[in-house]
Image (cartoon, grey):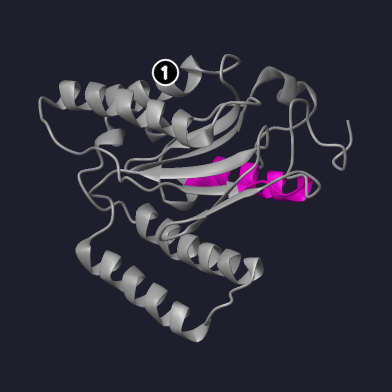
């Protein structure tokens, strides 16, 4: 298996097939059967001042990039937003409920529940206040529905565990279509290295690589 060919069960973005392009505060591109790098975070994981800073950045960006905006410009907004968000999340703001192994286990089991039923789960990392997932929903399975299932179930179970009520997850997630094998490798490296980058010991995080990927030599880079 060569780096150029990619690992088993990997489907990159196919420019020849339809891409659904949605825009909320961030652009969301989806393509049936493609692979995604997803980040979803706890509702309290970014302080109010950081959310205000993000909103100011977005407003300034929109002013600096008047309509009509090209896809490349929207992707630039996405990348810069994620660079900031990742840095702030790794600082460990909020209650960090996922640092509780029981809460992290709830998320891990939920991710595995649909593996090889609704999606192909390749790897993930559960941090104290967010999670990164590399996943390929099966053809006909909507990414938004998959995310909703994960979030809805885990929110109920985490609240039960913590004996609380209220929001658990931030409504909007960050998702990126994997363009090619090089992009896939960067996502794998990011997931594998994120805990160390945030200064966390191994006991605080989870990672997973499907056996077929391991046999092909697609493990995490240390």
| Residue 222 visible at all | no
User: Which quadrant of the structure image shows residue 84?
Assistant: bottom left
Quadrant, the N terminus: top right
Image coordinates of residue 214 in percent, x first then y, are 72, 24
Residue 211 or 20: which is nearer the viewer?
20
- Name the residue located 46 percent from the left edge and 59 percent from the top edge: 26
In the rendered image, the vertical position of residue 5 relative to residue 159, given as above or below: below
Q: Is residue 179 magenta?
A: yes
- Name the residue located 34 percent from the left edge and 21 percent from the top edge: 106
Look at mark 1 in the image and give the residue it sits on. Answer: 109
Provide the secondary structure element on which disc 1 rests: helix
Residue 145 or 49: which is nearer the viewer?
145
Residue 187 or 140: which is nearer the viewer?
140
Image coordinates of residue 45 in percent, x first then y, are 28, 50
- Name the residue located 34 percent from the left edge and 28 percent from the top edge: 104
| Secondary structure character of the magenta stretch overall | helix
Q: Is residue 222 magenta?
A: no
User: Which quadrant of the structure image shows residue 122?
Assistant: top right
- Name the residue located 48 percent from the left edge and 60 percent from the top edge: 82
Question: Which range of residues does the magenta coloring cover?
Answer: 177-194
User: Which quadrant of the structure image shows residue 193?
Assistant: top right
Answer left or right for 102 relative to 175.
left
Image coordinates of residue 143 in percent, x first then y, are 52, 35
């Amino acid at each position: 298996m060569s780096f150029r060919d990619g690992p088993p069960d990997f489907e990159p973005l196919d420019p020849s097939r339809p891409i659904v392009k949605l825009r909320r505060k961030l652009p969301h591109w989806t393509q049936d059967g493609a692979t995604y790098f997803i980040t979803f975070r706890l509702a309290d994981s970014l302080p109010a001042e950081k959310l205000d800073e993000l909103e100011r950045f977005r407003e300034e960006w929109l002013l600096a990039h008047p309509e009509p905006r090209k896809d490349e410009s929207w992707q630039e907004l996405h990348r810069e937003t994620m660079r900031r968000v990742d840095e702030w999340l790794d600082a460990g703001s909020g209650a960090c409920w996922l640092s509780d192994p029981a809460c992290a286990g709830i998320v891990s089991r939920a991710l595995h529940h649909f593996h090889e039923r609704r999606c192909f789960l390749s790897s993930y990392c559960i941090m104290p206040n967010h999670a990164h997932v590399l996943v390929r929903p099966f053809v006909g399975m909507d990414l938004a529905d998959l995310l909703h299932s994960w979030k809805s179930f885990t929110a109920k179970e985490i609240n039960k565990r913590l004996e609380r009520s209220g929001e658990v997850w931030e409504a909007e997630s960050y998702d990126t279509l994997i363009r090619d094998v090089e992009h896939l490798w960067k996502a794998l490296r990011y997931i594998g290295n994120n805990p160390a980058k945030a200064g966390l010991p191994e006991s605080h995080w989870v990672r997973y690589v499907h056996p077929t990927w391991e046999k092909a030599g697609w493990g995490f880079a240390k």
